[in-house]
Amino acid sequence: MSPPRATFYAHQTLNLHARYGLSDNAKKLLRAHDHWRTGSMEQVQLGRLVRMSPDMRKSITDTITKCAEIMRKKPAEVKNCIDIIQACTEILDAADKPPDLEGFPFLKLPPELRQNVYQWYAAKIIAPTLVAYPAEPNCDCGKWTPPNTSYPPALHRVDMALGRACKQIKNEYLEFLYHKFTLYFDCSCELNKRLRSNAALRSNIRSVKVHWTGPVSDKAFARLAKCQELRHLDIVISKSTTSFETPREREMRRFFHSLKPARLADALGIDELFTIRGLNSVCVSHVNGRQSVKRTDEERANLQGLLKSKLGLLGLD
Protein backbone atom coordinates (compact mmCIF):
# COMPACT_ATOMS: atom_id res chain seq x y z
CA MET A 1 0.00 0.00 0.00
CA SER A 2 1.48 3.33 -1.04
CA PRO A 3 1.93 6.02 1.62
CA PRO A 4 -0.63 8.85 1.66
CA ARG A 5 0.18 11.84 -0.48
CA ALA A 6 0.95 15.13 1.19
CA THR A 7 -1.68 17.85 0.95
CA PHE A 8 -1.34 21.30 -0.55
CA TYR A 9 -1.12 22.83 2.90
CA ALA A 10 1.61 20.38 3.94
CA HIS A 11 3.64 21.47 0.94
CA GLN A 12 2.92 25.08 1.80
CA THR A 13 4.26 24.49 5.32
CA LEU A 14 7.51 23.18 3.79
CA ASN A 15 7.64 26.27 1.54
CA LEU A 16 7.85 24.01 -1.51
CA HIS A 17 5.84 26.29 -3.77
CA ALA A 18 8.23 29.19 -3.27
CA ARG A 19 11.31 26.96 -3.48
CA TYR A 20 10.14 25.39 -6.71
CA GLY A 21 9.11 28.75 -8.16
CA LEU A 22 5.47 27.78 -8.85
CA SER A 23 3.24 30.45 -10.37
CA ASP A 24 0.14 31.89 -8.69
CA ASN A 25 -2.10 30.06 -11.19
CA ALA A 26 -0.41 26.77 -10.36
CA LYS A 27 -0.86 27.31 -6.63
CA LYS A 28 -4.51 28.21 -7.17
CA LEU A 29 -5.13 24.99 -9.11
CA LEU A 30 -3.21 22.84 -6.62
CA ARG A 31 -5.28 24.29 -3.79
CA ALA A 32 -8.47 23.56 -5.73
CA HIS A 33 -7.22 20.00 -6.37
CA ASP A 34 -6.79 19.58 -2.62
CA HIS A 35 -10.41 20.71 -2.11
CA TRP A 36 -11.54 18.16 -4.70
CA ARG A 37 -9.67 15.39 -2.90
CA THR A 38 -11.37 16.27 0.39
CA GLY A 39 -14.81 16.38 -1.26
CA SER A 40 -15.51 20.10 -0.93
CA MET A 41 -15.36 20.66 -4.70
CA GLU A 42 -16.79 18.77 -7.67
CA GLN A 43 -14.48 17.46 -10.38
CA VAL A 44 -16.46 19.48 -12.91
CA GLN A 45 -15.60 22.69 -11.05
CA LEU A 46 -11.91 21.75 -10.96
CA GLY A 47 -11.87 21.16 -14.71
CA ARG A 48 -13.70 24.42 -15.29
CA LEU A 49 -10.93 26.32 -13.48
CA VAL A 50 -8.32 24.89 -15.89
CA ARG A 51 -10.41 25.81 -18.92
CA MET A 52 -10.89 29.41 -17.80
CA SER A 53 -7.86 30.51 -19.84
CA PRO A 54 -4.85 29.04 -21.68
CA ASP A 55 -2.61 30.43 -18.94
CA MET A 56 -4.19 28.09 -16.37
CA ARG A 57 -3.38 24.97 -18.39
CA LYS A 58 0.11 26.27 -19.20
CA SER A 59 0.82 26.77 -15.50
CA ILE A 60 0.19 23.05 -14.92
CA THR A 61 2.48 21.91 -17.73
CA ASP A 62 5.17 24.35 -16.54
CA THR A 63 4.86 22.93 -13.02
CA ILE A 64 5.39 19.38 -14.30
CA THR A 65 8.51 20.54 -16.19
CA LYS A 66 9.90 22.30 -13.12
CA CYS A 67 9.34 19.28 -10.89
CA ALA A 68 11.05 16.98 -13.41
CA GLU A 69 14.07 19.29 -13.49
CA ILE A 70 14.21 19.45 -9.69
CA MET A 71 14.05 15.63 -9.45
CA ARG A 72 17.04 15.39 -11.81
CA LYS A 73 19.11 17.88 -9.83
CA LYS A 74 17.95 17.04 -6.28
CA PRO A 75 17.06 13.36 -5.77
CA ALA A 76 16.04 14.09 -2.17
CA GLU A 77 13.04 16.03 -3.49
CA VAL A 78 11.70 13.09 -5.52
CA LYS A 79 8.76 12.27 -3.21
CA ASN A 80 7.48 15.84 -3.04
CA CYS A 81 7.89 16.30 -6.79
CA ILE A 82 6.02 13.08 -7.53
CA ASP A 83 3.12 14.22 -5.32
CA ILE A 84 2.88 17.50 -7.20
CA ILE A 85 3.18 15.82 -10.63
CA GLN A 86 0.41 13.35 -9.72
CA ALA A 87 -1.78 16.27 -8.64
CA CYS A 88 -1.06 18.05 -11.94
CA THR A 89 -2.00 15.00 -14.02
CA GLU A 90 -5.28 14.63 -12.10
CA ILE A 91 -6.00 18.32 -12.71
CA LEU A 92 -5.44 17.86 -16.45
CA ASP A 93 -7.64 14.75 -16.44
CA ALA A 94 -10.43 16.78 -14.85
CA ALA A 95 -10.04 19.48 -17.52
CA ASP A 96 -10.09 16.95 -20.38
CA LYS A 97 -13.03 14.92 -19.05
CA PRO A 98 -15.99 15.03 -21.50
CA PRO A 99 -18.83 17.27 -20.27
CA ASP A 100 -21.77 15.69 -18.54
CA LEU A 101 -24.63 15.58 -21.03
CA GLU A 102 -27.27 14.94 -18.40
CA GLY A 103 -27.59 18.65 -17.67
CA PHE A 104 -27.43 20.73 -14.53
CA PRO A 105 -28.58 18.90 -11.34
CA PHE A 106 -31.29 21.47 -10.64
CA LEU A 107 -33.12 19.36 -8.07
CA LYS A 108 -29.97 19.14 -5.94
CA LEU A 109 -30.27 22.86 -5.19
CA PRO A 110 -31.88 23.83 -1.87
CA PRO A 111 -35.64 24.55 -2.12
CA GLU A 112 -35.01 28.23 -1.38
CA LEU A 113 -32.73 28.58 -4.42
CA ARG A 114 -35.21 26.74 -6.63
CA GLN A 115 -37.90 29.20 -5.52
CA ASN A 116 -35.59 32.05 -6.56
CA VAL A 117 -35.20 30.43 -9.98
CA TYR A 118 -38.99 30.13 -10.34
CA GLN A 119 -39.35 33.78 -9.39
CA TRP A 120 -36.76 34.79 -11.98
CA TYR A 121 -38.46 32.62 -14.62
CA ALA A 122 -41.82 34.24 -13.85
CA ALA A 123 -40.40 37.77 -13.95
CA LYS A 124 -41.70 38.15 -17.52
CA ILE A 125 -45.25 37.98 -16.15
CA ILE A 126 -45.99 41.67 -15.74
CA ALA A 127 -49.63 41.42 -14.66
CA PRO A 128 -50.96 40.13 -11.33
CA THR A 129 -53.69 38.02 -12.98
CA LEU A 130 -53.24 34.84 -15.03
CA VAL A 131 -55.95 33.55 -17.39
CA ALA A 132 -56.45 29.80 -17.51
CA TYR A 133 -56.38 28.42 -21.05
CA PRO A 134 -59.86 27.19 -22.13
CA ALA A 135 -60.19 23.47 -21.42
CA GLU A 136 -63.97 22.99 -21.82
CA PRO A 137 -64.69 22.75 -25.60
CA ASN A 138 -68.42 22.12 -25.08
CA CYS A 139 -68.97 25.19 -22.92
CA ASP A 140 -71.12 27.98 -24.43
CA CYS A 141 -70.64 30.60 -21.74
CA GLY A 142 -69.14 33.19 -24.07
CA LYS A 143 -65.43 33.28 -23.28
CA TRP A 144 -63.53 36.40 -24.10
CA THR A 145 -59.88 37.44 -23.78
CA PRO A 146 -59.20 41.17 -23.39
CA PRO A 147 -56.61 42.59 -25.82
CA ASN A 148 -53.34 43.75 -24.26
CA THR A 149 -53.79 47.37 -25.27
CA SER A 150 -52.51 48.89 -22.04
CA TYR A 151 -49.25 48.51 -20.15
CA PRO A 152 -49.31 46.58 -17.96
CA PRO A 153 -52.43 44.74 -19.15
CA ALA A 154 -55.19 44.05 -16.65
CA LEU A 155 -55.11 40.34 -17.60
CA HIS A 156 -52.14 38.42 -18.92
CA ARG A 157 -51.99 35.03 -20.66
CA VAL A 158 -48.80 33.01 -20.23
CA ASP A 159 -47.64 29.58 -21.37
CA MET A 160 -46.83 27.26 -18.45
CA ALA A 161 -43.82 25.75 -20.25
CA LEU A 162 -41.88 25.00 -17.07
CA GLY A 163 -44.90 23.19 -15.72
CA ARG A 164 -44.33 20.48 -18.33
CA ALA A 165 -40.92 19.46 -16.93
CA CYS A 166 -40.49 16.61 -14.45
CA LYS A 167 -43.17 16.02 -11.85
CA GLN A 168 -41.32 17.63 -8.94
CA ILE A 169 -40.43 20.81 -10.87
CA LYS A 170 -43.96 20.97 -12.21
CA ASN A 171 -45.46 20.76 -8.71
CA GLU A 172 -43.04 23.30 -7.25
CA TYR A 173 -43.45 25.81 -10.08
CA LEU A 174 -47.23 25.54 -10.17
CA GLU A 175 -47.34 25.91 -6.39
CA PHE A 176 -45.28 29.10 -6.78
CA LEU A 177 -47.64 30.47 -9.46
CA TYR A 178 -50.80 29.56 -7.56
CA HIS A 179 -49.47 31.33 -4.47
CA LYS A 180 -48.23 34.47 -6.21
CA PHE A 181 -50.83 35.29 -8.88
CA THR A 182 -54.58 35.63 -9.17
CA LEU A 183 -56.12 33.08 -11.55
CA TYR A 184 -58.98 34.26 -13.77
CA PHE A 185 -61.58 31.83 -15.10
CA ASP A 186 -63.92 32.81 -17.96
CA CYS A 187 -66.85 30.92 -16.45
CA SER A 188 -67.83 28.50 -13.71
CA CYS A 189 -67.50 25.58 -16.13
CA GLU A 190 -63.81 26.36 -16.54
CA LEU A 191 -63.30 26.71 -12.79
CA ASN A 192 -65.11 23.46 -12.07
CA LYS A 193 -63.09 21.48 -14.62
CA ARG A 194 -59.76 22.87 -13.38
CA LEU A 195 -60.51 22.17 -9.74
CA ARG A 196 -61.79 18.69 -10.53
CA SER A 197 -58.72 17.60 -12.51
CA ASN A 198 -55.85 19.56 -10.90
CA ALA A 199 -54.88 18.49 -7.38
CA ALA A 200 -52.03 21.03 -7.22
CA LEU A 201 -54.50 23.81 -7.99
CA ARG A 202 -56.89 22.66 -5.27
CA SER A 203 -54.08 22.48 -2.71
CA ASN A 204 -52.30 25.78 -3.44
CA ILE A 205 -54.62 28.31 -5.07
CA ARG A 206 -54.79 31.55 -3.05
CA SER A 207 -56.58 34.09 -5.24
CA VAL A 208 -59.40 33.49 -7.74
CA LYS A 209 -61.32 35.73 -10.12
CA VAL A 210 -64.22 34.02 -11.89
CA HIS A 211 -67.11 35.09 -14.10
CA TRP A 212 -70.18 33.73 -12.31
CA THR A 213 -72.05 32.09 -15.17
CA GLY A 214 -72.74 28.59 -16.41
CA PRO A 215 -74.81 25.50 -15.56
CA VAL A 216 -72.30 24.10 -13.02
CA SER A 217 -71.75 27.16 -10.84
CA ASP A 218 -72.99 25.26 -7.79
CA LYS A 219 -70.46 22.45 -8.32
CA ALA A 220 -67.63 24.91 -9.04
CA PHE A 221 -68.21 26.93 -5.86
CA ALA A 222 -68.62 23.75 -3.80
CA ARG A 223 -65.18 22.62 -4.98
CA LEU A 224 -63.77 26.10 -4.34
CA ALA A 225 -65.00 25.94 -0.75
CA LYS A 226 -62.69 22.94 -0.20
CA CYS A 227 -59.55 24.88 -1.19
CA GLN A 228 -57.83 25.40 2.15
CA GLU A 229 -55.30 28.00 0.90
CA LEU A 230 -57.87 30.33 -0.73
CA ARG A 231 -57.57 33.86 0.67
CA HIS A 232 -59.07 36.20 -1.96
CA LEU A 233 -62.16 35.84 -4.13
CA ASP A 234 -63.32 38.17 -6.91
CA ILE A 235 -66.78 37.36 -8.32
CA VAL A 236 -67.53 38.84 -11.75
CA ILE A 237 -71.27 39.25 -12.41
CA SER A 238 -73.30 39.86 -15.56
CA LYS A 239 -76.83 39.40 -16.87
CA SER A 240 -75.93 35.80 -17.68
CA THR A 241 -75.26 35.11 -13.99
CA THR A 242 -78.99 34.53 -13.48
CA SER A 243 -79.49 32.48 -16.66
CA PHE A 244 -79.31 29.42 -14.40
CA GLU A 245 -81.28 29.47 -11.15
CA THR A 246 -81.19 27.46 -7.96
CA PRO A 247 -83.35 24.29 -7.86
CA ARG A 248 -85.64 25.96 -5.33
CA GLU A 249 -86.19 29.00 -7.54
CA ARG A 250 -86.90 26.83 -10.59
CA GLU A 251 -89.52 24.91 -8.64
CA MET A 252 -91.14 28.10 -7.35
CA ARG A 253 -91.43 29.48 -10.88
CA ARG A 254 -93.34 26.38 -11.92
CA PHE A 255 -96.18 27.39 -9.60
CA PHE A 256 -95.67 31.12 -9.06
CA HIS A 257 -95.46 32.51 -12.55
CA SER A 258 -93.66 35.83 -12.71
CA LEU A 259 -92.33 37.98 -15.51
CA LYS A 260 -89.77 39.58 -13.23
CA PRO A 261 -86.12 38.73 -14.01
CA ALA A 262 -84.33 36.44 -11.59
CA ARG A 263 -82.45 38.08 -8.74
CA LEU A 264 -78.77 37.49 -7.95
CA ALA A 265 -79.92 35.89 -4.71
CA ASP A 266 -81.61 33.18 -6.83
CA ALA A 267 -78.67 32.50 -9.16
CA LEU A 268 -77.30 28.98 -9.30
CA GLY A 269 -74.35 28.66 -6.90
CA ILE A 270 -75.36 31.32 -4.35
CA ASP A 271 -75.79 28.80 -1.54
CA GLU A 272 -72.39 27.20 -2.26
CA LEU A 273 -70.74 30.62 -2.25
CA PHE A 274 -71.86 31.12 1.32
CA THR A 275 -70.02 27.98 2.45
CA ILE A 276 -66.56 29.36 1.55
CA ARG A 277 -64.43 30.12 4.62
CA GLY A 278 -60.94 31.39 5.43
CA LEU A 279 -60.95 34.40 3.10
CA ASN A 280 -59.11 37.63 3.85
CA SER A 281 -60.96 39.62 1.18
CA VAL A 282 -63.84 39.29 -1.26
CA CYS A 283 -65.08 41.64 -3.95
CA VAL A 284 -67.67 41.74 -6.73
CA SER A 285 -66.86 43.18 -10.16
CA HIS A 286 -68.78 43.98 -13.32
CA VAL A 287 -68.10 41.91 -16.41
CA ASN A 288 -66.34 43.61 -19.31
CA GLY A 289 -68.86 44.99 -21.77
CA ARG A 290 -67.36 42.97 -24.65
CA GLN A 291 -68.09 39.68 -22.93
CA SER A 292 -71.63 40.10 -21.60
CA VAL A 293 -74.27 42.61 -20.48
CA LYS A 294 -73.50 44.35 -17.21
CA ARG A 295 -75.77 44.42 -14.18
CA THR A 296 -76.47 47.56 -12.15
CA ASP A 297 -74.03 49.08 -9.68
CA GLU A 298 -76.66 48.64 -6.97
CA GLU A 299 -76.75 44.86 -7.56
CA ARG A 300 -72.97 44.69 -7.47
CA ALA A 301 -72.75 46.62 -4.19
CA ASN A 302 -75.57 44.61 -2.60
CA LEU A 303 -74.00 41.28 -3.51
CA GLN A 304 -70.62 42.39 -2.22
CA GLY A 305 -72.17 43.41 1.09
CA LEU A 306 -74.06 40.12 1.30
CA LEU A 307 -70.94 38.05 0.64
CA LYS A 308 -68.89 39.97 3.20
CA SER A 309 -71.61 39.44 5.76
CA LYS A 310 -72.07 35.73 5.06
CA LEU A 311 -68.32 35.04 4.86
CA GLY A 312 -67.56 36.94 8.06
CA LEU A 313 -65.53 39.75 6.49
CA LEU A 314 -67.45 42.83 7.57
CA GLY A 315 -65.27 43.36 10.64
CA LEU A 316 -62.09 43.31 8.52
CA ASP A 317 -62.81 46.55 6.65
Image (spheres, helix red, strand yellow):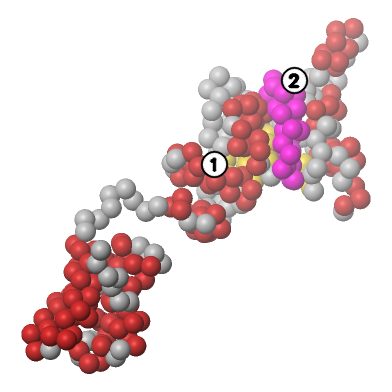
Residue 143 part of the magenta-drawn span: no
Tell me: residue 51, above or below residue 256: below
Residue, far top: 255
First in sequence: mark 2 or mark 1?
A: 1
Q: What residue type is disc 2 on?
A: Phe
Q: Residue 220's image quarter?
A: top right
Mark 2, mark 1: which one is toward the viewer?
Answer: 1
Tell me: residue 27, above or below residue 227: below
Residue 220 part of the magenta-drawn span: yes
Q: Magenta region: which residues?
A: 213-239
Q: Which residue is mark 1?
A: 171
Q: Is residue 140 visible?
A: yes
Query: Residue at image x 39%, y 64%?
Result: 39
Label placed on residue 231: none
- Left or right, 152 with reference to 214: left
Query: Residue at image x 54%, y 28%?
Result: 135
- Left or right, 195 with reference to 226: left
Which quadrant does the N terminus fall into? bottom left
Tell me: residue 106, above or below residue 76: above
- Looking at the picture, how far across and down is residue 64, in whole percent? 14, 78
Q: Which residue is mark 2?
A: 244
Tell me: residue 242, above or below residue 161: above
Q: Residues within 10 Å of mark 2 (few under 14, many from 20)?
A: some
User: How far is the residue under mark 2 from the one under mark 1?
Assistant: 35 Å
- Looking at the picture, how far across and down is residue 279, in whole percent? 79, 44
**Nearest the camera: 173 or 43?**
43
Query: At numbered mark 2, what does the secondary structure look like: helix, strand or loop?
Result: loop
Query: At numbered mark 1, what does the secondary structure look like: helix, strand or loop?
Result: helix
**Nearest the camera: 215 or 18?**
18
Q: Residues within 10 Å of mark 1 (few under 14, many from 20)?
A: some
Q: What residue type is disc 1 on?
A: Asn
